[in-house]
Image: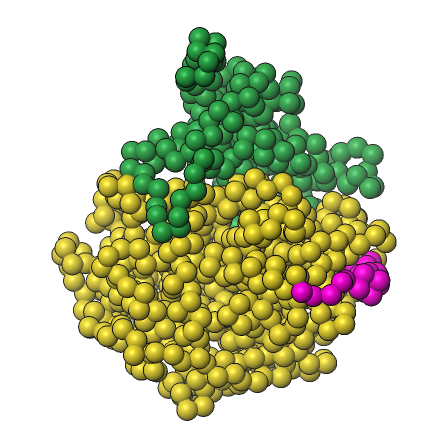
Amino acid sequence: MSDALQHDIVIVGGGGAGLRAAIALAELDPTLSVAVVSKVYPMRSHTVAAEGGAAAVIKDNDSLDAHCYDTISGSDWLADQDAVELFVREAPKELIQLEHWGCPWNREPDGHVAVRPFGGMNIERTWFAADKTGFHMLHTLFQTLLKYDEVVRYDEWFATKLLVADGRCQGVAAIELRTGQVRCIAAKAVILSTGGAGRIFPFTTNGAIKTGDGMALAYRAGVPLKDMEFVQYHPTGLPGTGILITEAARSEGGVLLNKHGERYLSNYDLGEPLDVHDPKHPQMRSMELGPRDRLSQAFVKEHEKGNTIDSPFGDVVHLDIRHLGEKKIDKLLPFVRELATNYAGIDPVHEPIPVRPVVHYMMGGIHTDINTATPLPGLYAVGECACISINGANRLGSNSLTKLLVFGARAGKAAAQYVGGCGAISVAAIQSQAVDEQVRITALLNKTGGSERIVSLRTDMYHAMESGAGIFRDESSLKRTCETLAEVRGRLRDIQLDDRSNCFNTELIAALELENMIDIANAVAHSALARTESRGSHQRTDFPDRDDANFLKHSMAYQTDGGPPRIEYLDVVITRWPPAERVYGAKPVETAGE
Amino acid sequence: MPEQTITLDVFRYRPDEDERSTIQSYDVPYYEHWVILDALNWIKDHVDGTLSFRWSCRMGVCGSCGMMINGDPKLTCAAFLKDYFPRAIRVEPLVNFPVERDLVIVMDDFMSKLTSVKPWLIRDDTRPMEEELLQSPSQLAAYKQFSMCINCLLCYAACPELDGDPDFLGPAAIALAHRYNLDSRDQGTAERQDILGAEEGVWGCALVGECTAVCPKNVDPAGAIQQAKVAVTKDWYKRLLLPWGKR
Ligand SMILES: Cc1cc2nc3c(=O)[nH]c(=O)nc-3n(C[C@H](O)[C@H](O)[C@H](O)COP(=O)(O)OP(=O)(O)OC[C@H]3O[C@@H](n4cnc5c(N)ncnc54)[C@H](O)[C@@H]3O)c2cc1C
């Protein structure tokens, strides 16, 4: 094996979170050696797909407490309030920073940035760049990073293992796709920013690359995965493909209709519909601007009542934005029009868009503290792969993009501080682990006689997750899911690849991603089985109520040797907003903390 | 499996095994709602795991899955089988790039061209983080279109100039440089001048306009290059006539 590559800090992941961390490091201390490893060219990262916007308090009618309250009540009180307060406080600065780097935020006539409302918000505070916010943010960050040529990029390198020696994380093993070589990338600190894991479900807004790799790497290194049972379904995905129709379609005034043309959300404690031409429509925290978990659950109930609409790709409801008119749609929602036209074959200017709930976001992830540090010294995590937690049991739309920036910058700072004081790298020890990793991967590549194809295992995992760990779950559905996943995990041993090539072997990568996904799926299912209450996105039909006495706690899944994960619990941090009922439907709420 | 199938004739090349490229034919199920990327994934899953290609978002925004389809550069996640059925579809890697393997091209040269135009906001001052740089909607509109590029490289495959002159910066990189030059917050036009004004910069383009025709995001790189030519020329005259720098 070639010599180890060496850096002070290696960031695994070139999405919004990883790039923000890299820029923070480059600005903080140009003498630090920083590397970004990414399995795709950074501008292909899935942050690119985010549409609606990024939340931060900027307008006079808003307040930090209001943003905190919306986030905390949205989280069904499972968010850590110290983390939320910090996040909300640093959010405006980070979005202005992005503006200074060139992000084309939409503007008011007077030149200030414009904001739009988003679901679960008391006051509009979502900054946006039309409906391609993530695209513009990612390209702005990537292009800004190009300025710092001292930051080394390993584009199209796939990290397979964290290298740990002397109780510290000291690097990663990664496959260079072009050559197929496994290399040891040694570093005093590693920042994981590998994104979410929506691909453990068959129907998702997440791109092919969102396979939970970083979560799996940390999990195998002994780091707990926190709150994994909380999986966000976005209420409006296109049937068949799962392509997202952004919440911004509703914040600009779009409405949801069942097969009778009724605004059915009014039957689910989400308020009363106002006429679409009423100047007060849409109302904050009400109806179509309720939180995602509640809207997705309402769909399932409507389905059970027989009020949804048949489609070749599963039942749908209608998202109607026709009353906005062509001009407004083209100005504020051009991507919605493009996507609906291309992928649903309808022009939303003239027809309602068929939509159904779709797996969108992982609230859970690698356990970190408020400074993005994991319990493993030298290992930091940030972005969707990490759980701090500001999202709790249900993420508020448009908080994630902001989270990438706030905690990305923070991860950079924390890691820089850590490498200033940690010892030297034990290169020999970790290089030998990387050699073992090369042996493992070569064996997988050259294996013969296996009988399982990737697609069959993946399909079985999909089915297990969709049928047993979806929007509504119960003990027996979850137990079945856990059993199937254990069986699928066992069959992985029998996997057989067609491709023996060392050059750009995407089948090999898919097999490694599958292994990661199965481990993550397992953590999700077992965490869900253990949480015998309903909270936010985790709805147990056998335990329909929230149980603060027993479960105002984060679940922490630890990998065990071969068996199911061990689930422990960690108290939620409450500062100024004691647990209360979640109230939606334009009823007045007291947002100020105590 | 539907009754109907469609044939994909796919370019194959593995550098560590093949001496030259070949075309391999696959029969895939035909569904009206399938895009070419779906068909490629079906092949990879069910028939031949050795076929390599890039893809991710499958919603036309990550820019990974550009390929030559019957000779035209397309995003395969946005090209539907139904627009070709029942005839066979030829799938090849984007032209004007070296091939890494199968449908995967080498992007190194593009990445360095992109970096060379300094595609970041350049300003002399730094503002406190409490303060937005104001920008009116019309100032935003001045460059917005040129900020929509997803780096899918279809325009590089379409460009006849790149065929003859591989050093030409190319449509996407020039459009991006022009995007920053047009941004009211940017003060870096002079710094981008040397590269844009060089022979491999805007002057490498003969305004054939193919780039604009194939752009899936309506960026209009040809328009950007045209405007950039005018700007570069004006600047050149200013430099010539006012050599003492009062530009
Ligand atoms: C369609 C869609 C729309 C959304 N809209 C919004 C919105 O409007 N507002 C909002 O706040 N949030 C939105 N979200 C959520 C938000 O976009 C994501 O949570 C966020 O972008 C994730 O960013 P990230 O940096 O953590 O990860 P990503 O952008 O997913 O990047 C992950 C990075 O890790 C790298 N990586 C992964 N595994 C490996 C490995 N094994 N080796 C090497 N590199 C690896 C990848 O190459 C990539 O660079 C949306 C999400 C989706 C799917």
In the rendered image, residue A430 lying in the magenta stretch gets the answer yes
| Segment colored magenta | A421-444
Residue furthest to the front? B244
- Main SS, magenta region, reads helix
Q: How many tags in the picture?
A: 0
Q: Quadrant of the C terminus of chain A?
A: bottom left
Q: What is the residue that sits farthest to the bottom in this orientation?
A: A549
**At x 62% / y 36%, what residue is drawn?**
B111
- Between A210 and A482, the one lying in front of the other is A210
The colour scheme used to paint the residues is by chain
The percent position of residue B181, horizontal first and vertical second, equals 44, 29
Q: Position of residue A151 (x, y in %)?
A: 64, 46
The magenta stretch spans residue A493 = no
Q: Nearer the viewer, residue A208 or A167?
A: A167
Q: Nearer the viewer, residue B123 or A57?
A: B123
Which residue sits at x=32%, y=33%?
A: B139
User: Residue pushed farthest left?
Assistant: A278
Q: Quadrant of the N terminus of chain A?
A: bottom right
Residue A298 horizontal/vertical position (percent) = 33, 71
* Point 41% across, 60% down: residue: A90
Res A571 seen here? yes
Of all chains in the rendering, the one displayed in yellow is: A
Vertical order, B18 against A472 (above or below): above
Res. B44 in view: no
Q: In the image, A328: left or right of A142? A: left
Give the answer, above or below, for where A166 lies relative to B241.
Answer: below
Give the residue drawn at x 59%, y 31%.
B116
Seen in the image, is A336 located left or right of residue B232?
Answer: left
> Where in the figure is residue A255, as x and y percent of width and height?
26, 58
The one nearer the camera, A571 or A9, is A9
Which chain is green in the picture?
Answer: B
